[in-house]
């Protein structure tokens, strides 16, 4: 990939925390890969031999319960680094990452990534900040599940998604990721029926509109009051 141009889109996430020189150095150590919708970028239980930096598109981080049900843990988008981020990348994946749409990503082997960090102390600090943010995200999600109702958690999640990947339209803010009601339910820890009832109620009140694969938030103020405060962050 050396000599090829870097992505022209504005960087975000881990990618944004790097300097231009650091991004160029990391780009030279990896190779660009394309994943179709529904394709796993990495699989739970597989050896953790590499990581990826998302360049375009969105993916969901999932894990299987003992009963074999899919549980959504997080959402990752352009600029995010994914793979097995705990430890030194020498173990096994603890979750699966599946593409929600066509994704372009920079794939970097573990040895090459470690060599990159050894050569760029600023990148190490950026990487640590990402890891700290992930731990904070996990703690926030756990507290939210303990302290709020299912409808409150769903309202906060939709607002979080709107802030992170919303697309302004004439009717409101459309969520740019095709998450199903089952995805939303598992993410906030409620039944699918609870999500269905809440969305039906909010549609009747003019707070949201729903189409296959698309949710549009039409009244963020009321949804924020339902959620009991500001979005907690993804």
Image: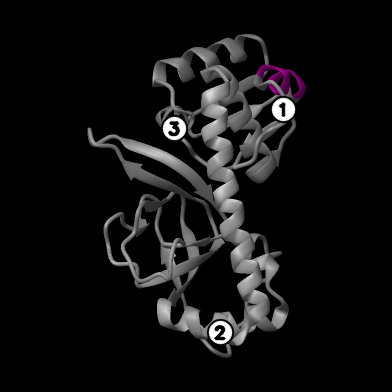
Q: Where is residue 174 in the image (x, y as percent from the top left)?
A: 64, 35
SS state under label 2: helix
What residue span does the magenta drawing correspond to? 221-226
Q: Is residue 7 visible?
A: no
Q: Name the residue under label 3.
A: 180
In the rendered view, how is the structure colored?
one colour
Residue 46 belongs to the span the image colors magenta: no
Q: Residue 211 carries which label?
A: none
Of labels 2 and 1, the one closer to you: 2
* Secondary structure at numbered mark 1: loop
Give the CA distance from mark 3 to mark 2: 41 Å
- Where does the image place residue 215, in percent across and percent down from the top left? 57, 30
Q: Name the residue under label 2.
A: 118
Is mark 2 in CB contact (under 8 Å) with mark 1?
Answer: no
Rendered residue at 69%/84% (across/down):
21
Q: Which of marks 2 and 1 is nearer the N terminus?
A: 2
Is 210 placed left or right of 22 in the picture? left
Q: In which quarter of the image is the C terminus?
A: top right
Q: Is residue 194 visible?
A: yes
Residue 139 at x, y percent in the picture = 55, 41
Crowding around mark 1 (Cα neighbors within 10 Å: few <14, some 14 to 19, many 20+) is few
Where does the image place residue 10, in percent across and percent down from the top left? 71, 64
Secondary element at tag 3:
loop
Q: Main secondary structure of the magenta part?
A: helix
Question: Quick one: label 3, few (<14), some, or many (20+) residues within 10 Å?
Answer: few
Seen in the picture, residue 132 relative to 226 is either above or below; the reply is: below
Q: Give the residue pinned by disc 1.
A: 171
Q: Nearer the viewer, mark 3 or mark 1?
A: 3
């Amino acid at each position: 990939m050396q000599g090829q141009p870097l992505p022209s889109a504005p960087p975000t996430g881990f990618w944004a925390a790097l300097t231009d020189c650091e991004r160029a150095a990391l780009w030279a150590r990896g190779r660009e890969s394309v994943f179709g919708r529904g394709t796993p970028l990495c699989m739970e239980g597989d050896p953790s031999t590499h990581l990826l930096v998302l360049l375009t598109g969105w993916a969901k981080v999932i894990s299987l319960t003992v009963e074999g049900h899919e549980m959504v843990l997080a959402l990752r988008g352009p600029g995010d680094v994914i793979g097995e981020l705990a430890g030194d990348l020498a173990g096994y994946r603890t979750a699966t990452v599946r593409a929600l749409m066509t994704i372009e990503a920079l794939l970097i082997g573990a040895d090459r990534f470690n060599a990159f960090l050894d050569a760029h102390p600023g990148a190490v600090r950026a990487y640590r900040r990402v890891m700290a943010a992930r731990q904070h995200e996990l703690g926030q999600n756990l507290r939210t599940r303990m302290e709020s109702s299912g409808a409150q958690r769903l309202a906060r999640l939709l607002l979080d998604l709107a802030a992170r990947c919303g697309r302004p339209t004439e009717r409101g803010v459309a969520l740019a990721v095709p998450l199903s009601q089952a995805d939303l339910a598992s993410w906030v820890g409620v039944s699918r029926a609870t999500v269905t009832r809440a969305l039906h109620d909010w549609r009747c009140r003019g707070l949201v509109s729903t189409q296959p694969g698309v949710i549009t938030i039409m009244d963020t103020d009321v949804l924020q009051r339902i959620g009991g405060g500001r979005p907690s962050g993804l």
